[in-house]
Amino acid sequence: MHLGPSELILNKDGSIYHLNLFPEDISDTVILVGDPGRVERVSRHFDTLEVNKRKREFITHTGRYKGKRMTVLSTGIGTDNIDIVLNEIDALANIDLKNRKEIKDNKIINFIRIGTSGTIQDEIRVDSFLLSEFALGFDSVVYYYSGMAGRQPEMESALLDHLNWDSNKSRPYVVKGDETLLQHFRGEGVVQGFTGSNVGFYGPQGRFLRLQPSEASLFDKLSSFSYRGKKLTNFEMETSALYGLSALLGHRAISLNAIIANRATIAFSEDPGRTVDRLIHWTLEKLVQL
Ligand SMILES: O=P(O)(O)O[C@H]1O[C@H](CO)[C@@H](O)[C@H]1O
Ligand SMILES: O=c1cc[nH]c(=O)[nH]1
């Protein structure tokens, strides 16, 4: 199918609209970070830097770490930005931008998110690393696409029963990370988790400064949910759409979280930057072995 100029939008120089990139600018290993400032914290470890581009909050560096070509790209905050980033990276990989048609042999991208997150379980230590085995999406991005790849309907039903969900809010969905990548990144010292991706940092994560909650018991209901021994472990704001869209597009994704807050013990990391830097270094080393 030919994609017209209002659908597949290209800049004057032919680069993709928001990311400002050409197909040759990206590797098939893409590290996603929320914070644009974190891109340099990753690429400072690279031996060589070949691409350094930006538009809006989307900064992209491509280079080599110990010989392996990698791209690190900032998504900004939220699942709506993940919709842009996943669709545009996929277009760079799998659409011929000149004739505006899908390329026959689809390329598979490995997406590795390195993010910050708050745990909701008291036994998970601040400054630990958490690998999201499953993601719970409070956003509704996946509902705009056809298909159920990666989705976990039984977990979704169990959760909806447990929460007695308010129908004014979008229906939460559950999606699994890519098993090949999960296997590679599982290991000692890494908590395996079930990550909630919320549609905000405050109310949607049960944080209230001056406003009052519409449902006072929601945070407790979420932290007490368990499905076949798997508890909901932590909150952040991107992993669900990353897992959902990657599965639908045929890519692989995992999400690694630096736990900087513990909402159950009301603790915050004394040095979150150090924890993020440790997670970056650990992830780069694991990626070289992939
Ligand atoms: O540190 P990043 O990757 O931005 O991730 C987390 O931090 C932001 C909120 O402070 C949200 O994007 C959340 O997902
Ligand atoms: O509590 C937290 C910490 C980091 N990021 C979030 O989204 N929530």
Image: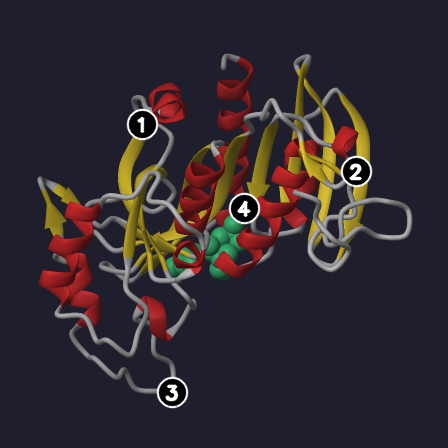
Instruction: Identify the amino acid type marked 4.
Output: Gly
Q: Is residue 78 visible?
A: no
Label 2 vs label 4, nearer the camera: 2
The part of the image, by quadrant, that contains residue 170 is bottom left
Q: Which residue is mark 2?
A: 99
Q: CA distance from mark 3 to mark 4?
A: 28 Å
Instruction: Identify the amino acid type marked 3.
Output: Arg
The part of the image, by quadrant, that contains residue 102 is top right
Q: Which residue is mark 1?
A: 189
Q: Which residue is mark 3?
A: 210
Q: Which residue is mark 4?
A: 273
**Quick one: SS at disc 3?**
loop
Query: Which residue is painted at 48% across and 49% down in the image?
Result: 272
Q: CA distance from mark 1 to mark 2?
A: 48 Å
**Quick one: SS at disc 1?**
loop
Residue 72 at x, y percent in the picture: 65, 36
Of the image marks 2 and 4, the number of the one nearer the N terminus: 2
- State how many labels appear: 4
Query: Which residue is painted at 37% across and 45% down in the image?
Result: 147
Instruction: Identify the amino acid type marked 1.
Output: Gly
Of the image marks 1 and 2, the number of the one nearer the N terminus: 2
